[in-house]
Image: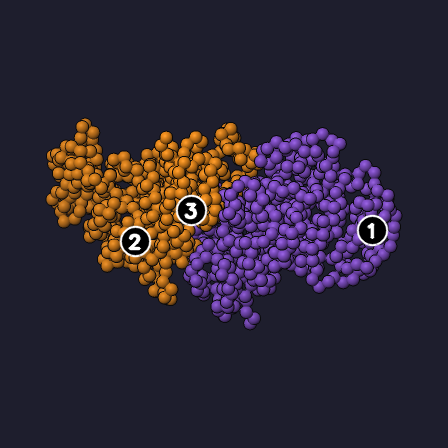
Chain colours: A orange, B purple
């Protein structure tokens, strides 16, 4: 028996495979109402083979297993548990579960969650259980970077002792030597442990943006040949694609793989897209130049960037959901990626979320007591290892989740003021000039004469952060602006109930009924204020 | 008798001029050591003509006056008063008085200072006397804009009652009708009053960035024909060019003069440059597209922009000093140009100043008690009318002045980290790759592959704000970064005394002696911190 949106598994005992424990001949076809879904099975050690499937419909599925094992049968799939909504996929620029439920993600980052000891891991899960976040970005391979040097207990694959050491230059330009991984010989202890974590995260309703490659590496996983990369991915997909809460993040900072050619990434996105029968979200995260999100296999924008006004622009460019997967972290480090204030972390979440994007958090607060390099390497920073959160943004992010949950539907960006200039071409602006508010028309020609660079320099700090839920609600986030009064631009001829939200102090208050376009609303004159206008029934 | 760096004046009584009281035939040639300086005299009403001159050297000048009045004579010029340093001019990318003294300007904005009643004007001067600022931006023509609607007591010229009313569309796209100004008939009461203010500002050591045209106009001064514009400027220069503290700002937001052609502005910059015998600073201030600062007549960059990391880029582009003359104002208005916090106003001053630029303040704090449009028009906001300052940034700007005064020389920007990418071409970056720190080399290829737009989006929020005074001192401003520890990039082989400055809390403390490159310095982990490294003697 199975349940909609939960992984079902078939297990078989058979002789261990030969040279490759990954490329095993085991396929299964699941069928319901004439619709077939094919998956590949995998070897799990101990003369055990498994086939995993994710049913998305109620009723009876039949299946046929072929290859090393031959089997056929059927099973009844019961309706989904109320708390599970299925795989998250892109629908236009929104994220939506398989059952149609919209999801606004509130991500966090614990890159090396999978590679910490049990005590720390438990602490991390206790923290995650507090419900600040519903998405986590984490790596499959271990991570070697500042503040994060520990070896894991298990690697995904055994090192190939029979081979020569490979020499490679790591991302910090240090020369490293290591025996290569043997991607045909998984370390099953690693995978069992890893899957246990995935299951716990699923039980907590956490989406897992699984980072498949990353350059912070002293073991060589970022320096395998492409055949090995694809073998590794083959195994990942056989094992993990039936997990309902998986997203594929091809890399963290793909553009720091200095020895890789862009074609390799293209081959990888095509491979994953082709092999993954359950069509999980798939993207690739940059350090500098964003990946080409227009590629067919890529389902959404996964961006590292600290210019927070780009949701509408990127939605328009790619027609896909926009995730700001890295926009610097709440922290106190010397590195500029790790020293924004809690207020600014919160601010960035609001800017992205109210314009219809999805944002991701991280925390790097280093204890003042730490002195030596060894202490620093051993430090537990949330962003790398997990543990406890010390910062002040998570509570505010949770508050934002509550605000978003109270909205009548998914958010789309609303282009007002100069923000239009960041998302539309000059031709488009000119064409719509008849629709622009009177107050902007006088400026239009001056703006249209700007060169591209000046236009960016001018409009980015002037961007508005406004979204709407259809015609039911409008949300204005004033961010860094310290307005004591505002006149939110609203549709004519309707009345609105106005809620004032303080993003930092976490207060919400209905301030006006029967509010109309052109009316003035008072605000406290400090940063981080939002106004939600909800249409009143006639 | 005269004094170096102070205006001297010759006065003559003669019959009133004919049709034009501006284009009067009166010239004077001043001569010393074979060097001649020609100026034009002006009619001051009441059958009085004046010639003004600004001596810049000690000793005896001879002069010869020709035209309506004929005269010749000589006068002794005494050494400058210790507190006067002469006209501020550009030398490379720095501002320097005639006597060689460098000046870092700390500007403020009181656009309509010249058009307020006496009581308010006195209050404004009392405020200016507190020494927050050493430069003020103000308009010659009256201003009609939000929060600023009052008619002045006098206009620069009488309206021409004999002519038809002219109709024009003002900057708010309202159609206005007004008798045109008769630029041949100055209202001498206006000019006497205006000059009294200039003299008071000079006595307070304030530079006056005099705005000659602006579009916030219901009287028609921004809709005169070009011949009238030049006649007006002719009069301005005859009267005011000998004031030592004058700068010429051709316009506020020149690009909002929708009916003007760019050639008009070019003709104006050439005209001023040609007519002004004392070579005051001359620039033109934008709303959107900056003016072409590469023009020969233009002495410096006068920028409206809120992207604060552009000093080095603009210095490199134009080889001239860079003034951020508008970067939004401390305030609580609904308009985004008028609602940054005191912290952010202070932050922007620091970002510009430590990178070797010059910044300008404004304040628009509207009282909560104000309800009606009439009350709003009558409100006294510093930025328009003057009065008292209510904000918290002026005190911090004064503190920054003190910090800058303690530095051993003028500041030049120091390009570290990604900031190089904003100021240098990709070719230049590639050429200097051998000089880049090891930590950046790994990223270089990734960065060089970025498209222009992504490069801006990436590097602007990553910009470093660092300057140096030759090889004697280095100043690192961490701005929005909340570092608990830093490793300032310093020259190798030298020892430094490290001063930690809190820009907001206005504290300064020497934290280390014998500090070397690579050493770690502790900071409190919040925003708005600066570190000054001063080379220690061997």
Q: Residues within 10 Å of mark 1 (few under 14, many from 20)?
A: some
Query: As drawn, is B201 to the left or to the right of B501?
Result: right
> Which SS class for mark 3?
strand
Residue annotated with mark 3? A529
Residue B122 is tagged as: none
Image spot of residue B129 (x, y percent): 63, 58
The correct choice, above or below, for A97 with respect to A525 in the image is above
Chain name for mark 3: A
Chain letter of the residue beneath label 1 in the structure image: B
| Residue A139 in sight from this viewpoint | yes
Residue at position x 24%, y 47% in the image: A204
**A80 or A495: nearer the viewer:** A495
**Pointer 1 residue:** B11
Residue A157 in percent (x, y) is at: 24, 51
The residue at the point 56 percent across, 56 percent down is: B394
Q: Is residue A381 left or right of residue A481?
A: left
Give the distance between the C-alpha atoms of the residues marked 3 and 2, in whole angstroms.
Answer: 35 Å
Check disc 3: other Cα within 10 Å, few if <14, some if 14-19, many if 20+.
many
Residue receiving disc 2? A112
Labels 3 and 2: the sequence-earlier one = 2
Question: Looking at this view, is B1 or A180 the one in front?
Answer: B1
Residues flagged by tags 2 and 1 on a common chain: no
x and y, in percent, of residue B113 in the image:
64, 48
Q: Quadrant of residue A40?
A: top left
Mark 2 vs mark 1: in front: 1
Answer yes or no: do the residues labelled 3 and 2 have beta carbons within 8 Å?
no
Could you tell me how far apart the alpha carbons at marks 3 and 1 are, in whole angstroms? 61 Å
């Amino acid at each position: 028996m199975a349940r909609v949106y939960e992984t079902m598994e078939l297990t078989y005992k058979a002789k261990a495979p030969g040279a490759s424990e990954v490329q095993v001949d085991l396929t299964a076809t699941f069928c319901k109402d004439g619709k077939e879904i094919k998956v590949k099975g995998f070897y799990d050690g101990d003369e055990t083979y498994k086939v995993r499937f994710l049913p998305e419909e109620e009723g009876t599925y039949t299946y046929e297993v072929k290859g090393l094992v031959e089997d056929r049968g059927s099973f009844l799939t019961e309706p989904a548990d109320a708390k599970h909504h299925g795989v998250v996929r892109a629908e236009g620029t929104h994220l939506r579960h398989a059952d149609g439920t919209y999801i606004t993600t509130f991500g966090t980052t614990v890159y090396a969650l999978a590679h910490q000891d049990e005590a720390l891991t438990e602490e991390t899960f206790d923290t995650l259980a507090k419900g600040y976040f519903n998405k986590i970005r984490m790596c499959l391979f271990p991570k070697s970077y500042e503040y994060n040097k520990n070896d894991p207990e298990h690697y995904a694959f055994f090192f190939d002792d029979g081979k020569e050491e490979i020499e490679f230059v790591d991302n910090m330009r240090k020369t490293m030597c290591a025996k290569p991984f043997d991607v045909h010989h998984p370390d099953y202890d690693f995978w069992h442990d890893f899957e246990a974590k995935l299951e716990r995260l699923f039980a907590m309703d956490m989406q897992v943006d699984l980072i498949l490659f990353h350059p912070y590496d002293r073991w060589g996983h970022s320096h395998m040949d492409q055949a090995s990369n694809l073998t590794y991915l083959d195994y990942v997909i056989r094992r993990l694609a039936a997990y309902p809460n998986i997203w594929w993040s091809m890399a963290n900072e793909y553009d720091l793989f200095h020895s890789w050619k862009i074609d390799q990434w293209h081959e990888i996105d095509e491979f994953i897209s082709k092999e993954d029968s359950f069509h999980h979200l798939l993207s690739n995260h940059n350090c500098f130049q964003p990946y080409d999100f227009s590629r067919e296999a890529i389902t959404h924008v996964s961006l590292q960037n600290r210019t927070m006004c780009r949701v509408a622009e990127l939605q328009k460019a790619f027609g896909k959901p926009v995730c700001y997967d890295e926009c610097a972290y709440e922290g106190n480090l010397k590195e500029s990626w790790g020293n924004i204030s809690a207020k600014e972390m919160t601010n960035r979440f609001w800017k992205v979320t109210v314009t219809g994007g999805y944002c991701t958090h991280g925390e790097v607060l280093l204890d003042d007591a730490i002195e030596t390099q060894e202490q620093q390497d051993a430090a537990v920073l949330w962003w790398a290892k997990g543990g406890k959160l010390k910062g002040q943004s998570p509570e505010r992010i949770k508050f934002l989740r509550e605000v978003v949950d109270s909205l009548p539907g998914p958010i789309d960006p609303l282009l007002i003021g100069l923000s239009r200039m960041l998302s539309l071409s000059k031709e488009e602006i000119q064409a719509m000039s008849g629709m622009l508010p009177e107050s902007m028309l006088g400026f239009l020609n001056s703006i249209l004469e700007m060169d591209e660079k000046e236009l960016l320099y001018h409009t980015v700090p002037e961007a508005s952060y406004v979204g709407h839920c259809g015609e039911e609600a409008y949300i204005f986030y004033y961010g860094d602006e310290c307005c004591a009064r505002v006149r939110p631009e609203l549709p004519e001829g309707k009345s609105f109930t106005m809620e004032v939200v303080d993003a930092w102090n976490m207060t919400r208050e209905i301030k006006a009924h029967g509010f109309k376009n052109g009316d003035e609303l008072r605000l406290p004159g400090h940063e981080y204020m939002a106004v939600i206008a909800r249409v009143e029934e006639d």
